[in-house]
Image (cartoon, helix red, strand yellow):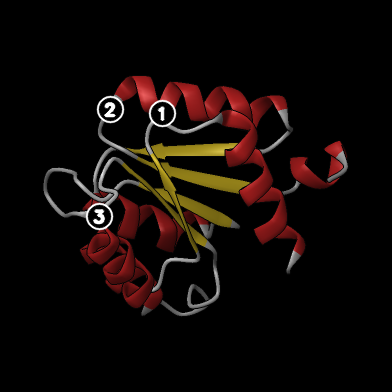
Amino acid sequence: MRENAAAQQSIMIVDDFDEVRLMMRSVLERSGYRVVEVVNGQEAIETARRERPDLILMDLSMPVLDGFGAIYHIRRQAGMYDVPIVIISSHTAPEVRADAFAAGCSDYLPKPFDSHQLKEIIDRLLAQD
């Protein structure tokens, strides 16, 4: 993806751990994306409505509202049904992955994740638009 194209796109990071958000932000900003960070699923719903991100990186286990609940509500917002949502989670059981896809996620990346793999997933999903 060209740097100037990425600069026009925004990615929302939804994770309750500062270190994880910092690592993702670093990868994304180096690639030219605008980054919005939130710490729980309820903030994700409100921020998605306001910011209309081009892609969402979502943890599953968070306080207030988990990733499953956030996906459910975000997918029902006008204009948000097709926004790619990538789950980034330490939950690797096949049934959790299946539940995440059933809830509406576009891809699933287990923690700890490789930054190159994260970038490849983002580039692939945003190129589909």
Query: What amino acid type should be assigned to the residue bearing mark 2?
Result: Phe
Q: Position of residue 87 (x, y in %)?
A: 40, 53
Gap between marks 2 and 1 measured at Cα: 6 Å
Task: Say what secondary structure mark 1 lies in.
Answer: helix
Q: Is residue 99 left or right of residue 79?
A: left
Q: Nearer the viewer, residue 12 or 114?
A: 114
Query: What amino acid type should be assigned to the residue bearing mark 1?
Result: Arg
Which sits earlier in the primary sequence, circle 1 or circle 3?
1
Q: Position of residue 79 (x, y in %)?
A: 53, 77
**What residue sits 28% from the left and 40% below the top?**
90
Mark 3 or 2, closer to the camera:
3
Q: From this viewpoint, which residue is outermost toward the front?
A: 94
Q: From this viewpoint, which residue is outermost toward the left?
A: 64
**What residue sits 76% from the left and 60% below the top?**
127
Q: Nearer the viewer, residue 17 or 89?
A: 89
Residue under pointer 3: 93
Q: Position of residue 32 (x, y in %)?
A: 73, 33
Please tell me whether residue 36 is drawn above or below residue 127 in the rendered image: above
Task: Say what secondary structure mark 3 lies in.
Answer: loop
* The disc label shown at residue 63, or none: none
Residue under pointer 1: 21
Gap between marks 3 and 2 measured at Cα: 21 Å
- Evaluate if marks 2 and 1 touch, with contact meaning CB atoms under 8 Å apart: yes
Q: Position of residue 25 (x, y in %)?
A: 53, 28
Gap between marks 1 and 3 measured at Cα: 23 Å
Query: What amino acid type should be assigned to the residue bearing mark 3?
Result: Ala
User: Residue 45 appears in which quarter of the rendering?
Assistant: bottom left
Please tell me whether residue 49 is drawn above or below residue 58 in the rendered image: below
Task: Say what secondary structure mark 2 lies in.
Answer: loop
* The disc label shown at residue 17, or none: 2
